[in-house]
Amino acid sequence: MGEVIVITSGKGGVGKTTTTANIGIGLSKRNKKTLVIDTDLGLRNLDVVLGLENRIVYNLVDVINGNCRLKQALISDSRYPELYLLPSAQTKDKSAVSPEQMRKLIAELREDFDFILLDCPAGIEQGFQNAIAGADKAIVVTTPEVSAIRDADRIIGLLEVNGIRDHSLVINRLRIDMVKRGDMMSVEDVTEILAVNLLGVIPDDEQVVIATNQGNPIVGESPKAGLAYEHICRRILGEEIPLMDFHHSESLLSKVSHLFKMN
Amino acid sequence: MSVPSVVIAKDRLKNLVTADRVHCTPDSIQLMSTEIYRTLSKYIELNPEDFQINFTHTDIHIHYINDRRKH
């Protein structure tokens, strides 16, 4: 029976969808049968980040309404045989799906997968309630900014109220140079305020933008964000991997790029 | 020298998060803390610098160092 994880944040634009996509790909590369579900009704994005936008026939609302069989709506990815996507609908009606329907759907799906990842919409309204309805645990994504951390704290409170006490934090887009200058909160600053388990830290990496432009994954493909996502996947699978030493890796990276320039 | 912006960010964030957690304004948190301190100091030996209140989602933690333990 599979594990169901919701990826949430409260604030929009902090990297929920990118995180869902890359953890999904990372787990499937490790031979875990993984389903990623886009629960953002009206604004679907996960398909685009995965580069599967041209493959959509049926969506989550079709499945809920019985317009198609469950299997017909699942999109497989030829690059990753163990990865499946259940896309969201582009309908405007945000109440097309209820938490109870989501719970039923997840209960049915979890028999067939090792992992189900739910990409949650921004906000704390019905879309959030739908996304967390069937989840066992949560990954809360934040960036080291006041507004994002504040929203993450509210989300953590709401998860607890809804009985999801197994939650861990991903700090995204950390800029080591700014932390060193005292102009960005460090990992320690963030965890001191939020007091939750830390699952991983993704350094700011322009390769993420490039990969997203192309509809390609970043996990395992770049020495900064790619490696950080890979470590997150391995931690989810139970491996104990220490956090990257950013101060060290930064200097090492600049040394490596220096070497390349010399040649 | 100017204060690093992280110091300001952390300060603002701590106030915001605490206020959000107990659903009241940052000002009333300050008042509440002062009042709790006053009330406790009627019964316990307290020092303002050895007294701290933390608000989590489910608990209010009051930390203090008893003066007599220091001697």
Image (cartoon, rainbow, N blue to C red):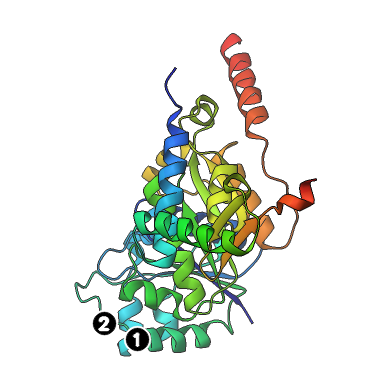
Q: Chain of mark 1?
A: A
> Depth-wise, is mark 1 or mark 2 nearer the camera?
2
Q: Nearer the viewer, residue A203 or A150?
A: A150
Q: Position of residue A256 (x, y in %)?
A: 63, 21
Q: Secondary structure at mark 1?
A: helix
Q: Is residue B50 above or below residue A223?
A: below
Location of residue A8 in the rendering, given as x and y in whole percent from the top left corner: 44, 63
Q: Are marks 1 and 2 on the same chain?
A: yes
Contact flag, marks 1 and 2 (Cβ < 8 Å): yes
On screen, residue A70 above or below B13: below
Name the kind of residue labelled 2 in the image: Ala
Q: Is residue A228 above or below residue A50?
A: above
Examine the rendered structure and indicate whether residue B38 appears above or below residue A164. above
Residue A71: x, y in percent? Answer: 45, 82
Q: Is residue A259 left or right of residue A133?
A: right
Horizontal side, residue A190 vs residue A73: left or right: right
* Residue plotted at (46% across, 27% down): B4
Q: Residue at x 51, y 26 (%)?
A: A177
- Residue on which the image places disc 1: A64
Give the SS element for disc 2: loop
- Quadrant including the C terminus of chain B: top right
- Which quadrant of the structure image shows residue B29? bottom left
Residue for badge 2 = A96
Sequence-first disc among 1 and 2: 1
